[in-house]
């Protein structure tokens, strides 16, 4: 074996079988399948204190813990900040090509489980599941299209769509903020910003949801390819191409199907990320009195409050899965070729190597890794921040909601990537609309 150091992290390449030279099995590196039982990811998702769960995992297993996605399907959960950064920056032999996961060879049960869906192989190259030059080619259109979106237009469009959503329930005094506000908000805002009319936007986002759920991925690509073919000549009021039109005819794509996959990846991932961040922001303002007081009292600006959400109630639990391309040693564990690696960016807020004891320690810092690092980082974190900030400010300007049930009864969607609430029921003082003036 040859020892290496990656960003100060000790590792070993060419690990082989992991047997110690002396043959003493007590000193063998731990393999993923060695423990008879390991923590279940479902328990982490269900917990109301994910930070405490991450702390227990570190105490028991160190910085990389074996976890169970479904019975018979395991993965390594990486909770240490520096290691996550090194892995995201391609400093370990990992690939984002999920077809390389050894769970496919083992015919892991519950293959259609929501927790296994992000590890499903794909028959077409997607921006998230490719590396190297192919990833760069597929990523370029998204960077260029999002780079020309005007911030002022984002704020105005988001505010208008949010006002429309609030108008639908403001007079009732009750609402499920997830179903009636958080869930539809990205569809309406992003659809308008991409240049779609309301009907086309709904078709695109419905297709993206189907494709993400793997219920009918091929059909989703076909449908969006057809919709994009009608966008190639679409123009904005100033005569410039719409963002969707730019994607549809971008020179980096080799086919309309590739452009459709790019749009599907953008809309599916952006939707979940925006929904999770907004829901976690609203959840924290309703359940954490100190956060609510600081926010309402002006001691934190909205941006600082959003950063604190990313630290203490991260909407992103893990980055897109990585798969070990070869064996290597890390933290006394033998990661074998084909093992799934989950980079738990949601754990860095409780990492004692970078955070202090005060939960507000680091307020305002943007080193939380929520948007990833390296070549697979989020292409437009500033747009995501602007949309979520506008949506949160618009709601709190209009209403003063309180939670309609005990916080410990809230549940999260079974997804190891995004921490998204299933519901967020609230009550508030109904808005009183004056009757129309009659002369």
Image (tube, rainbow, N blue to C red):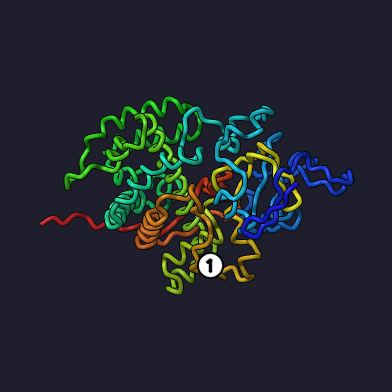
Left or right of 298 in this view: 338: right
* Quarter of the figure that contains the C terminus: bottom left
Q: Position of residue 96 (x, y in %)?
A: 55, 40
Q: Mark 1 Cα within 10 Å, few/some/many (few <14, many 20+)?
A: few
Snapshot quadrant of residue 311: bottom right
Please say if 355 is above or below 60: below
The residue under the point 57% across, 55% down is 85
Residue 404 in view here: no
The extreme left residue here reads: 439
Q: Position of residue 293 (x, y in %)?
A: 49, 71
Q: Position of residue 431 (x, y in %)?
A: 33, 58
The local secondary structure at tag 1 comes to helix
Please say if 24 is above or below 214: below
Q: In the image shown, does 338 or 180 lie closer to the viewer?
A: 338
Left or right of 331 in this view: 163: left
The residue under the point 60% across, 36% down is 116
Q: Which residue is mark 1?
A: 289
Residue 172 in view here: yes
Q: Position of residue 60 (x, y in %)?
A: 76, 54
The residue under the point 49% across, 53% down is 371
The residue under the point 48% across, 50% down is 377
Count the marks: how many?
A: 1
Snapshot quadrant of residue 337: top right
Left or right of 151 in this view: 424: right
């Amino acid at each position: 074996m040859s020892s290496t150091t990656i960003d100060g992290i000790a590792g070993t390449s060419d690990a082989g079988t992991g047997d110690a030279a002396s043959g003493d099995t007590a000193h063998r590196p731990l393999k993923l399948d060695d423990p008879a039982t390991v923590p279940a990811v479902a328990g982490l998702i269900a917990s109301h204190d994910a930070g405490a769960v991450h702390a227990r995992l570190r105490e028991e297993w160190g910085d990389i813990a074996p976890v169970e996605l479904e019975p018979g399907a395991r993965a390594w959960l990486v909770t240490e900040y520096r290691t996550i950064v090194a892995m995201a920056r391609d400093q370990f032999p990992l690939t984002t090509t999920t077809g390389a996961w050894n769970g496919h060879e083992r015919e892991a049960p519950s293959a259609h489980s929501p927790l296994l869906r992000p590890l499903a192989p794909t028959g077409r190259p997607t921006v998230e599941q490719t590396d190297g030059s192919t990833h760069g080619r597929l990523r370029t259109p998204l960077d260029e299209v999002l780079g020309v979106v005007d911030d002022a237009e984002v704020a105005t469009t988001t505010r208008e769509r949010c006002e429309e959503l609030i108008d639908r329930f403001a007079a009732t005094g009750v609402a499920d903020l997830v179903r009636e506000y958080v869930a539809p908000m990205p569809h309406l805002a992003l659809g308008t910003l991409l240049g779609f009319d309301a009907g086309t936007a709904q078709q695109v986002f419905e297709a993206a949801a189907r494709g993400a759920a793997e219920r009918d991925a091929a059909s989703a690509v076909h449908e969006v390819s057809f919709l994009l073919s009608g966008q190639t000549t679409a123009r904005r009021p100033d005569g410039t191409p719409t963002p969707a039109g730019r994607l549809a005819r971008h020179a980096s794509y080799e086919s309309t199907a590739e452009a459709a996959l790019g749009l599907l990846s953008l809309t599916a991932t952006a939707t979940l990320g925006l929904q999770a961040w907004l829901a976690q922001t609203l959840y924290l303002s309703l359940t954490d009195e100190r956060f609510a007081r600081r926010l309402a009292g002006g001691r934190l600006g909205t941006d600082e409050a959003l950063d604190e959400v990313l630290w203490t109630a991260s909407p992103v639990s893990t980055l897109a899965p990585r798969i070990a391309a070869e064996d290597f040693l890390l933290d006394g564990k033998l990661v074998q070729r084909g093992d799934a690696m989950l980079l738990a960016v949601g754990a860095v807020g409780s990492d004692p190597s970078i955070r202090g004891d005060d939960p507000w320690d680091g307020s305002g810092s943007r080193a939380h890794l929520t948007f990833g690092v390296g070549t697979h980082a989020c292409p437009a974190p500033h747009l995501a921040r602007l949309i979520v900030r506008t949506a949160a400010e618009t709601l709190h300007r209009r209403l003063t909601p309180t939670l309609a049930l005990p916080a410990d009864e809230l549940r999260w969607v079974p997804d190891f990537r995004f921490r998204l609430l299933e519901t967020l029921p609230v009550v508030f003082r109904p808005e009183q609309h004056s009757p129309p003036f009659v002369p």
